[in-house]
Image: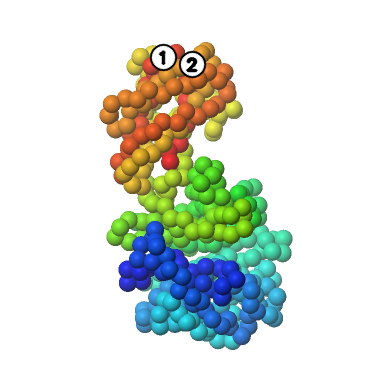
Amino acid sequence: MSRFDGVYYAYSTNNGFGNVPVASASSLTGAWTRRGDALPALGAWASGGLTWAPDVSRRADGRYLLYYTARSRTVGRQCIGAALATSPLGPFTPVGTQPLVCNGGEGGDIDASSFTDSTGARYLLYKDDGNAIGQPTSLWLQGVAPDGLTFQGGRVELLRSGRAEEAGVIEAPVLTKVGSQYVLFYSLGGYGGDGYQTSYATSAALTGSYTKAYRSLITTDSVNGAVRGPGGADVVRDAAGDSIVFHGWINNYSARGMYVAALGWSGGFPVVRGSRVRTEAERGALNHCSVRSTTSASQGQVVAYIDYADSWVQLSVFAPRAGAYTVYVAYSAGLGDAQHTLTVNGASPVTVNYPNTGWETWRQAPVNVTLNAGANTIRLTRLTRWAELDYIEVA
């Protein structure tokens, strides 16, 4: 996804229509118009049919640079090529007779994206395709000249696969900077199903080290199944507010569709509207109640002994945009049905009902609320009987 002179351009993996299908719109939410094939001819090094993950940026000289992934005839792996055009619609003309990045020993290289730092320095990000040959995968940063083609210095490894949920795959790197913090978005897991998801890592320095988020940013579950296998995220930052654009499975997993959601920043960390963000109850402000340790709960702790009229738990949550949200309260109640009241920013309370679950059996009670853009204060106060609180999630 790119925005040039107030127009949005979406470039896609080949889908039976050319090498790099392109569509344009005056708004992120459409209507989108298909504009043809931005790359009618591949570089001489590439064979057709496997053209993936295009990225288009504008250079300082006004020309448009396309990075794309295609199959190398010589290496027999996916590699990264480049092409130039005078219009974001193309036609883009391949640069050179060889790929820009192509290392068969690491399984090939894919998913290129461009990043220009606040200093004006330009960089290429990409993924080595190690999972294609049974090796871990890494995300790389390579300095480039203003032309986006001439390498400057050696590459730097920013992140490597290793967590269980990644299944050996991290890919689709996209880098942005929020204040003084670098935020590296990436996809993880198996592309073919619901396990594909979007996460991020952060660093105070461009070259790292990067710390992976504790939980993924967008998953099939975090959006309540509204998108299946959300991945391939890109960030659009403009005067209307930041947004995240990504794709997910549609038509019974036969194709990928494009989605957009509001993106906000809580202390430099991304929050996506519609994707649940968890806040542990034990991390809030507590009054006349206390924390209890239990292995059955999220992160091993809950707030218990919310037994008195002045017992409450107060948490801060972040909303990317003002509007309607749902708070999901994770609780257990073991001595009959219980109730708390919930207030948002000190407004009139609403009642939260907790049907009896039995102690150590955790369920969620959804509550519809209206939140302000930015930080909001949620307070849960005892009303009737007894319940313990594990966490809240907001989406």
Q: Position of residue 103 (x, y in %)?
A: 65, 74
Seen in the image, is 369 located left or right of residue 296? left
For residue 380, above or below residue 229: above
Seen in the image, is 133 located left or right of residue 349? right
What residue lies at 39% left-to-right and 62% top-to-bottom? 31
Seen in the image, is 215 located left or right of residue 270? right
Q: Which residue is mark 2?
A: 337
Q: Which residue is mark 1?
A: 384
Q: How many marks?
A: 2
What residue lies at 50% left-to-right and 29% top-to-bottom? 364
Q: Quadrant of residue 76?
A: bottom right
Q: Quadrant of the C terminus?
A: top left
Seen in the image, is 73 located left or right of residue 235? right
Q: Quadrant of residue 102?
A: bottom right
Q: Nearer the viewer, residue 265 or 223?
A: 223
Dot 1, how many residues are within 10 Å of its Cα: few (below 14), some (14-19), or many (20+)?
A: some
What residue lies at 69% left-to-right and 81% top-to-bottom? 74
